[in-house]
Structure formats: structure tokens, C-alpha cells
Amino acid sequence: MTGALRIEAEPRIGLLSERRRVTVEATVPGSLVTLRAETLRGAELWASQATFLADADGRVDLDVSAPVSGDYRVADAMGLFWAQRRETAVGGGVEPRAVAEPILTRITGRAEPGTGLLDVPAEGVFDRGAPPAFAEVVVEQRLLAEGVRRREIRERGLVATLFRPAGAGPFPTIIVMNGSGGGVNEPRAALYAAHGIQALALGYFKAPGLPDYISRTPLEYFERALDYAVAELDPLGGAPLVSGQSRGGELTLLLAATFPERILGAVAFVPAAFVFGAQGAADPAEGWNGPTWTRGGEPLEHLWHDNREVDWQPWNDDPAPTRHADVYVDGLRDRALARAARIPIERFPGPVACVSGLDDRAWPSSLASRIVLDALERHGHAAERLHLDYADAGHGITIPHLPSTEIERVHPVSGVHYSNGGTPRGNAEASTDSFDRVCEFVHRAARQTSTHEQ
């Protein structure tokens, strides 16, 4: 016989970015135990399930034992979280919507009846007449750390949310921007603040009071945000870093090249090395090959502007002309236009980090990152250059410990189907590793600049 089945999760309550250790105690030696993790994310139910083999002591450590069946097959307790799949069809993404609300995951476990060691007498191993053993635990993941202050910003025409860490400061400060889905990326900014980084989550379209589309977004808007950060936020090192993902990664590098004296460092997630047209987030009146960014009222040159080598596009669900066609490669064949659309990142003297996936199917972020970092090196860039390039990751590198199973996606603006690429495990590992290493990079950049100023 064994005692009552128990599931333990440590820490049971903590930040989203914290790993949990999950163990099962007091089950039958050599028996099978099935765990199910359910999380209500917005209006959607997400769940994962896996079955484990208990050791000779009737114990399972999920960081030591891989599941023998289920939704993932590696020794990783966080697999119960990143391997979750959508079980309802209400709609909505996986990222948290309200940063003040904890994410609650109910982990239930049952001992599979009749299982256990077969090479020892049954007596004393399990009670065949007893009901199946059952246990549960609720894990609470938080985005807001104790003492972090959230404040909505509606000044100077800006639409943003500020997350300030506990303490007196000054703090490393970063401006966080979303990609072609638009909106305000509060979850990432809140987690940065939990790790001692002041973060301004900045909306620039598809947010209250802002345009619905990315087309013709003025760079002067971001210039005001940079000035606001310096004047009002007291950033460590005297200036903010900028960071964004996808189109926000393109924008990050573009801002660094355009306003190098106002920016301390750049962190570009799955970025582009060129200015592109509005693509999937375009105003329908402009179209995919209309301009994305303007300065002084004039559109910036972009790679889809009358490109002589591109006569097709993948942003309306049409198939590529051939299996090997890649519009991002085809576009570079118009050398004059590619040269005009390239982001001149060599103008930026500060530290630069690029995060990419080698299996990025949305656009070639690994190639773009290498183009950017190679250009900096060839032009004598003296500050830190960091490239986090993940072999099994795609375009969906996000914050840690969220489900990473939805590889095939529907674009939130255009409704077009596309693939992010990567594997669930690869995307999950890239999200966790890159978050930790980017936090270290931001702190390093701010400290080094602050030290040099003294």
C-alpha cells in the first residue's frame, strides 16, 4: 500500500517567468500516473496531458522522467504548460490580456488502476479494491511582481503603459513594441519590470485612439516616445533601449539607425534587416505593397515598392509559384531597391541584440539578424553584439512558459493563414532562454553606459 497520492509544484505561486518543479508522491511503485494541466486563458480552455512511470519509491519527478505517452516526450516539468493545446474555439491568442490577473493552472493526477511492478508479489504494492488514487494542485503564475507599479500613459499623443519596478531607481529602461498584430504588449513589459527593468509598453496602431492599420506610421511618434522616456522616466544610462518583435523588430532597428543619439541599445526579436511594405497589417486602401513608415510626411522606401523581381506575394493566402519560391529572397534581386530599403544599422553605436529562429516560416529572421550584425562588425561597431539564434524555433518566440503549440496561425489583422515555424519544444525553449538572456543584456547595457558617464 501507499499513502494518499500527492502532486507538489514548487513554487506554487510565483512569476510567469519562474520554472516550476512538479513531482508526484506516494503512488504505487512502477505504476503509471497520468497528469492533466488545464488553464483558462481569457475565454479559452487550454490543456495538456501526459502519463509517467513511477519509480521504485512510488515517485515521479517531471524534470527527471520523460512521459511515456501524452502531448510531449521530454523530461521537463514546464512541458505541462508549453505543450497545452486549445480545447475550445472561442477565439483569442495565448498571451495574457490582463496583467493584474494571475494565470491559474489546475494540475490533476490519477494513478492508473491495476498498474505497478509485476515482478513482485501484489500484496503490499497496491490495494486492488481501493478506488483510483487522485490528486490535484493549482499553480498560480503572475505577471506583476510585488511592488511593480502600472500606469497608463496618455501624454504627448502617446498610447502606452508604464511598468516601474519596486525601489528608488534609476532603472534600466526599455520601450516595448508589438509587431503586425498591433496593440500594447503589457505582458512582456510587466515581466521586465519584475526583473528590475522599467518598461514602457508602447502602442502604435490597433490600440485605443490609434489607427487600425500599420500603414503610414510616422517615425515622429516614436521620437516623442524617446523624448518622453528621457524627460520623465529617469532611465539608467541617460536613455532608453528599444525593443520589438517581428514588425516591431524591424522598427527597433530602424529607430536605432534613425535616432542613434536618443537610444541606449536595441533588442530586436525575429526582426527584418530591410524596411518592408505594410504586408499583412496594411490598410486595405493601401495594399500589402503600400508604405509602412513615414518621416517628415514622406514614406520611407521599402522593398516592395515597384520591386522589379517580385510579381507575387504570400499575404493573401495564395500559394507560392513554386515550392522553393521565397518572396524575401526574390526581393533582394532588385539590388538598387534593396540597397535603398536596407536599414543602415551601422549608424548606431550602442549595443545590439537580435533574437531569431532558424526555422522562421513567417520571414527569414535568422538571415536578417546575420545581415544586421555582420554590417555592424564590418563598420567597426565597438559595443556588444548578441545574436540568439535558435535551431528549432520559428517566428513565435515570446515570453516564457506559455503554450507554444500553435505553429499554424491566422493573422490577427488580415485573417491570412501562415506558419510561424519551429517546434513546440523549440519555441518554448527559445522563449525562456531569450527572456533571461535579454534581461541580462539590458542590465549590462545600462550599467556599462552609466559607468562610462561617471
Image: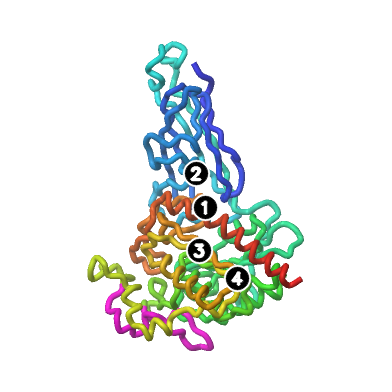
So how many labels did they put on this image? Answer: 4
Mark 2 or mark 4: which comes first in sequence? 2
Asked if the residues shown at circle 3 and circle 2 are in contact, with their CB atoms under 8 angstroms apart, the answer is no
Q: Quick one: label 2, few (<14), some, or many (20+) residues within 10 Å? A: many
| Residue 387, numbered circle | 3
Q: Mark number for residue 383?
A: 4
> Which residue is under mark 2?
78
Give the magenta range. Answer: 289-313
Residue 91: percent from left, percent from top: 41, 56
Is any atom of residue 91 visible in this view? no
Distance from the alpha carbon under mark 3 to that under mark 2: 25 Å
Please tell me whether mark 1 sits on a helix, a strand or a loop: helix
- Specify whether 294 is left or right of 314: right
Q: Is residue 69 above or below residue 418?
A: above
Query: Could you tell which of marks 3 and 1 lies nearer the N-terminus?
Result: 3
Q: Residue at x 53, y 88 (%)?
A: 296
Q: Is 305 part of what is drawn in magenta?
A: yes
**Distance from Cα at disc 3 to Cα at disc 4:** 13 Å
The percent coordinates of residue 291 (x first, y second) are: 42, 81
**Neighbourhood count class around disc 1 (C-alpha, 10 Å): few under 14, some 14–19, many 20 upward:** some
Instruction: Depth check: give the residue in front, 239 or 106.
Output: 239
Q: CA distance from mark 3 to mark 1?
A: 15 Å
Spatial CA span between label 2 and label 4: 35 Å
